[in-house]
Amino acid sequence: MRPAKRIDRDEFAAAPIAGTASSSNRRLGSLEHMFWLLDQNRPVHFAVTAQLAGRASPYDWLEALEHLQERHPILSVCVDGSPGSLPRFRQEDPAPIPLRIVEGDPRARWQSEVSEELSTPLDASRAPLIRAVLIQGSRNTAFILVAHHSIADGLSLAYALRDTISAVSGGFLAPLPSLPSQEEILAARAPRIALASAAKEQQDDAPAGSPGIYRPLDHARPTVKGLRLEPALTESIRDRARQEGTTVHGALSAAVVVAGRQVFADWWEIPVRIMSPINIRPLLGVGENCGVFVSAATGVFDERPKVFWQLARDAKIAIAGGQTREGVAALVKALGGIVDKGAEVAKVAEFAAAAFVHEAMLTNLGELSFANRGPLTLEEMWGPAVLSGMEGEHTIGVATVNGSICLTHTSHRPSGELLETMQSVLIKACQ
């Protein structure tokens, strides 16, 4: 097996990216600011992976990444600031997106390459805050994008993967405008909300139980594992969830709780907290731009046994507040109270350990539609793979592609057969 190699785009003639520098210079929003500070405590950058049938040349991928930066201005910025300051995104002479190339079996290698990327920090002071990995087999490909969390959420990387694959296949990527932060967009679109009251409610709703404890800062590689649910099971989950008055996400949350209690003995002794990032793009009207456009909510599942579908309905109810303008405004206000006058890394890390503590995070990109044309056909998507740096945490990334749910488990804790147990729980629940 050949070692990985890195291609420097400066080896090839490439036109500079123009017209985006001034529009990308702005102060970080509160959530972007929080992610920037948290990343200095423990790395919180993340990865999404596309599994593809077919191959293209490294030159085609490099050119496609150039077009990706032209489409999404935020993929050419760095962060200018220091802890305690009010940092800004800055773009001067955009640097190319680094591309690392690995030759080997994409299906066998993508998990280990994602693990390596998660253990390798991104320097927020140097643009761009995104990098790519290309794993090439004889007939198929895996393509990984890795981003700093201050510039992107999970859907951002899913859209960026789609855009890159389209560009490789000869598609045109229309430039998108730079956007303000999500609270600026919310303030412009939303009616007046009692933000002070909302912020207090957000703080009062912190998950029950003890705050999180951060892992040693040892740059250890986490375990990353994927499991694809067959289309028939995916359809059964969707249909049965609808009949039971819940959602696919609710069913997956219940599966995490039930399976986790079968795999991890200590989960029987504690309320299990499942945190769910929430896509708020529809509320903000931002479409498919790269950026941070998320809220979050946490469901707490106590030790009392419940039937599976009641857990799934409880999970749906638990995240409902984070899907409203008022819920989003509460989160924005609470974060603003922490960072808006400048904050230190330790203060924000302490806040996150209490407000966002969880045993597992279920981050669901939903059902993604990709047009397959040209030399590459999308078969599966894996991720988001991400951790917040706390002891014992698990992240389950979810993406539904080609009628199949793809589950990605990321953790530093030995996981047993968590994904396989989730699959068995879902099969039984849908019978």
Image (cartoon, rainbow, N blue to C red):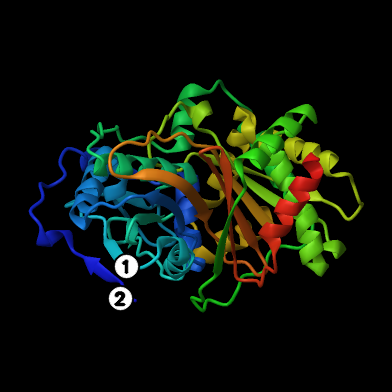
Q: How many marks?
A: 2
Mark yes or no: residue 385 visible: yes
Dots 1 and 2: beta carbons under 8 Å? yes
Could you tell me which quadrant the C terminus lies in?
top right
Q: 362 left or right of 116?
A: right
At horizontal 44% and vertical 33% (from top left) the residue drawn is 184
At horizontal 22% and vertical 43% (from top left) the residue drawn is 67
Which residue does the numbered mark 2 point to in the structure image?
2
Which residue does the numbered mark 1 point to in the structure image?
103
At horizontal 82% and vertical 56% (from top left) the residue drawn is 271
Q: 217 left or right of 252?
A: left
Mark yes or no: residue 199 visible: no
On the image, the x and y values in percent for residue 261 come to: 81, 60
Q: Secondary structure at mark 2?
A: loop
| Front residue of 371 and 42 | 371
Instruction: Determine which of the numbered discs, if any, sits on residue 141 in the image.
Output: none
* Other residues around mark 1 within 10 Å, as few (<14) / some (14–19) / many (≥20): some
At label 2, the amino acid type is Arg
At horizontal 44% and vertical 60% (from top left) the residue drawn is 84
